[in-house]
Structures are given as C-alpha cells and as structure tokens.
Image: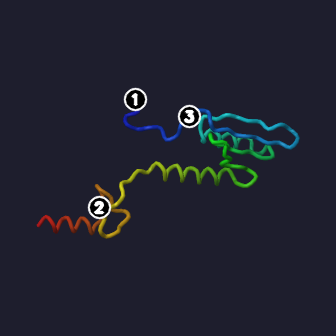
Amino acid sequence: MTGGLEPTEEIDGSVTVRLLDDGDETRTIRCDSYSDAIEVVKDHKQSVTAAKIVDRDESVVFTSAEMDIERWEAAWEDAKRELSVDVEESDCPHDDDGCVPGDRCVRCQLSNARAGY
C-alpha cells in the first residue's frame, strides 16, 4: 500500500535511448524511467556520436547533438516538480498568489479577524 501516494512516473519500459555512432548501427536501450534513460545517456555520451531519449509516443525529447544532458536533466526535474504541485486556486480578494486555503495571506487573516468582531 502506498499510503495515498501515487507514483509520479510510470515504469513500463517505454522510454528508450538510441545511441548513434558513425559507421556502427544504432543501438536501442529500453529504460524503465526517464531517470534510467538519463543515466544511460551520461554513461555513453563520450563513446557515441549522438544519444537520443525517445518517449512512449516515439517523440525525441532529448538529443545530445543539440542539448547538454545535465541542463536537460535540470529542466526535466523542474518540469516534473512543477507538475507534482497540486495547489487549489487562490480565491484571495487581494490577488496574493501565495494565499491558499490553510495558509492565508496577512491581509486575509486581518479581514477574517475583523469579521469575527
């Protein structure tokens, strides 16, 4: 049982890394996750001409010929973190983006205190 927490990434072997070499055939390595695919690219980046990460829709999401794997990994981590944040939309009358249910802004707290008197 996961205690209410669901996995943030499906693991079904549908992410692939394609390693391209001048003169040699293209090698395809199936990975269980993007994290695994990133590690495969890092392990082989010096020994191949280009490495690509291909998603389950057969779209190339990374290519070493155009991007640095460390920068792409940081952007991927940021995007994954952004998608995992589940915050209710703010209904703050003061348009404070940080004002959310359970953690109201100071102006909302003051308004609520005044309403109680």
Percent coordinates x, y for residue 109 in the rendering? 24, 64
Residues 58 and 68: in front is 58
Comparing labels 3 and 1, the label whose residue is closer to the camera: 3
Element carrying mark 2: loop
Q: Which mark is residue 82?
A: none
Percent coordinates x, y for residue 102 in the rendering? 28, 55
In the picture of the structure, the residue carrying the numbered disc 3 is 11
Comparing labels 3 and 2, the label whose residue is closer to the camera: 3
Q: Amino acid at mark 3?
A: Ile
Q: CA distance from mark 3 to mark 1?
A: 17 Å
Asked whether the residues under the numbered discs 1 and 2 touch, taking CB atoms below 8 Å apart as contact, a structural biologist would say: no
Element carrying mark 1: loop
Q: Residues within 10 Å of mark 3 (few under 14, many from 20)?
A: few
Q: CA distance from mark 3 to mark 2?
A: 38 Å
- Residue at 58% in and 32% down: 12
- Residue at 27% in and 69% down: 107
In the picture of the structure, the residue carrying the numbered disc 2 is 104
Return the disc, 3 or 1, that comes first in the chain's sequence.
1
Percent coordinates x, y for residue 76 in the rendering? 58, 50
In the picture of the structure, the residue carrying the numbered disc 1 is 1
